[in-house]
Amino acid sequence: MSKKAIEAKGLSKRFKTGRSYVEVLKAIDFDADHGDVTMVMGPSGSGKSTLVAALSGLLRPDTGDVTALDTKIWKLSSGRMDKFRLDHCGFIFQGFNLFPAQTALQQVSTVLRFKGQDAAAAKARAKVALDEVGLGHRINQRPAELSGGEKQRVAIARALAKEPKLIFADEPTSALDSENGQVVIRLLHRAAKEHGAAVICVTHDPRLQSFADRIIHIEDGRILDDVRQTPSAPTGAGH
């Protein structure tokens, strides 16, 4: 497998609004490496969420292609695309996307069961993942009983439990206070550095910039600049 976890060439996407079209992505080339935290930053409406949706197989681009883990994902059938995302991708969204009726443990173990793990193995792995995000004592709580920061940690545990090589995070800290934001940053950083994942994070949050290996600014559907830097190590321990 190449060092590049994902590479996109010539991605364009336009949406119809009334009688006209708005071009949201304008022939973008993009790549991200294993072990890197790549921040995609830009104002609202700049195209950054559309870019991540196209990279992750959630939104088909009008032109261009995406090679993820040496697989041309937009050549896959929808069933094989779903399986690719299940096996290789972790998603962390601003809105958490948790199931109201499930406990934290069930939220995480359900994904592992879909991947084919038996019930006991899935439960054991889910416990470890929740412990890693500091929620070992909250595994039987449902979303209504958890704070915003705890819900985001459940979502991260669910994404990381299957040890994905591609992690897509869309505004993962926007609803969180500074302390919980730090926890999220630390966990994304660890996924990249200890597990070799390519972490691609869309954010407005300036607190995240210093922890990135690479910062890509998008405006009006085009990449304005692409800067590599030495990231700061997140503060605090694992919990």
Image (cartoon, rainbow, N blue to C red):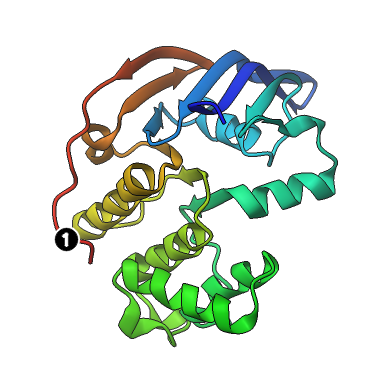
Q: Position of residue 98 (x, y in %)?
A: 54, 69
- The quadrant of the rendering that contains the N terminus is top right
Give me the residue at 57% from left, 29% from top.
51
Q: Quadrant of residue 154?
A: bottom left
Q: Position of residue 26 (x, y in %)?
A: 62, 13
Seen from this angle, which residue lies furthest front? 1
The one of 163 and 213 positioned closer to us in this rendering: 163
In this rendering, does residue 100 appear at all?
A: no
In the drawing, does residue 178 fall left or right of residue 45?
left
Seen from this angle, which residue lies furthest left? 236
Q: Position of residue 135 (x, y in %)?
A: 33, 75
Q: Quadrant of residue 120?
A: bottom right
Up/down of 204 relative to 78, above or below: above
Up/down of 31 relative to 157, above or below: above
Give me the residue at 60% from left, 68% from top.
112
Seen from this angle, which residue lies furthest bottom? 140
- The quadrant of the rendering that contains the C terminus is bottom left
Other-residue count near label 1 (Cα within 10 Å), few / some / many at <14 / 14–19 / ≥20: few
In the drawing, does residue 95 fall left or right of residue 235?
right
In this rendering, does residue 219 appear at all?
A: yes
Query: Quick one: SS at disc 1?
Result: loop
Give me the residue at 50% from left, 58% from top.
159
Up/down of 202 relative to 214, above or below: below
The one of 57 and 20 positioned closer to us in this rendering: 57
Residue placed under numbered mark 1 in the picture:
237
* Number of on-image labels: 1
In the drawing, does residue 165 fall left or right of residue 10?
left
Up/down of 215 relative to 95, above or below: above
Q: Amino acid at mark 1?
A: Ala
Give me the residue at 30% from left, 57% from top.
176
Q: Position of residue 117 (x, y in %)?
A: 64, 72
Q: Quadrant of residue 118?
A: bottom right
